[in-house]
Image (cartoon, helix red, strand yellow):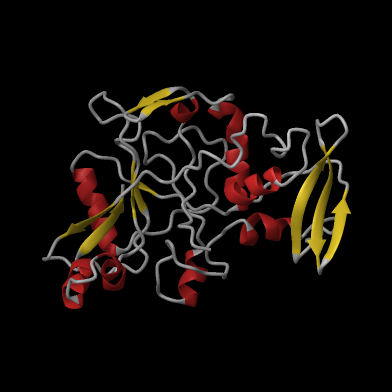
Amino acid sequence: KFYGAVLIRYRREDFSEMEHYGGVSPAWPFSYEEFEPWYSRAEQLFRVRGALGEDPTEPFHSIPYAFGPVPDEPPIARARAELKGLGLHPASLPLGVDIDAWLRDGKTGWDAFPNTGTGKVDAQSGPLTAALADRNIRLETGAHVEYLEASSDATTIAAVHYRQDGTLKKVTPKLVVLSAGAVNSAAILLRSPSPSGKGLANRSDQVGRNFMNHNSSAMLAIDPRRRNTSVYQKTLMLNDYYLSDGKGGKPLGNVQLLGKIDGHILRANVKLAPKFALDFMAGHAVDWYL
């Protein structure tokens, strides 16, 4: 569980066609308004902490956040104030983090931190735990889906074939939801039998292709006069340049804090630099994800 627990809604404009420096992002087949109730439901399931009214790009919320934002640590509160002083609109990151539970387990940041506890609210500790409270729902563990079997008219999934404890089994539900992540969902479709031999839902031959990754970088803002004593740091974002460059030009993207960088992390990328210098840099930096 490495994820940084940031749960930002796409902006309303993201659902329309938008021109970026890298090309045109096509319009979605539905609008933000159609999607909005499901955002609200997901935020409830993931117990998202956040604040409305800080970010001018924030779209309409039919239900406010159930919990207030994770508080800024003092160095970050100072950075927020300085950004506001520049006329920008720093806003609290919406986070699926139970900050009290997280800090009880250790004084460390959660961003990219491997953890199997409940401090970060993910699909297991949030929606799955809530679902298993229903006596009509059972979780089959140790089960590996081998393939999906299509109906005779190839319009629905008739059965799920899976292996459990060395035995091949199958279930024939009325509805099948394939939600195994970008890699494994594609792998299951590709190894499922189909008339074309290319896997299910793959007439385009594009299943398993075109994977995307973050188009991003990291930046350390270093001030040798100020020590950053933050433990988790990651509570702030800036979207002033998300929908345009601030001057009517093309979008530049989101800016948000990273989890706190330390000398060991820097050492992995700058192996020949002396450790004391890296520790000093990390200890006097505010770390940004661009």
Q: Is residue 285 left or right of residue 182?
A: left
Instruction: Identify which residue is drawn at 62% across, 56% down.
Output: 123
The quarter holding residue 33 reads top right
Q: Is residue 33 left or right of residue 24?
A: right
Q: Is residue 77 above or below residue 188?
A: below
- 147 or 10, which is in the foreground? 147
- Residue shown at 71%/39% (left/top)? 199
Q: In terms of depth relative to the viewer, which is nearer, 60 or 251?
A: 251
Residue under the point 80% across and 61% down = 163
Residue 17 % position (x, y): 45, 22
Q: Quadrant of residue 148?
A: top right
Nearer-the-camera pick, 23 or 242? 23
Q: Residue furthest left?
A: 225
Residue 48: horizontal and vertical position, in percent? 53, 52
Number of marks drawn: 0
Tell me where residue 238 appears, x and y as whole percent: 32, 43
Residue 68 % position (x, y): 47, 53
At horizontal 30% and vertical 73% (from top left) the residue drawn is: 264
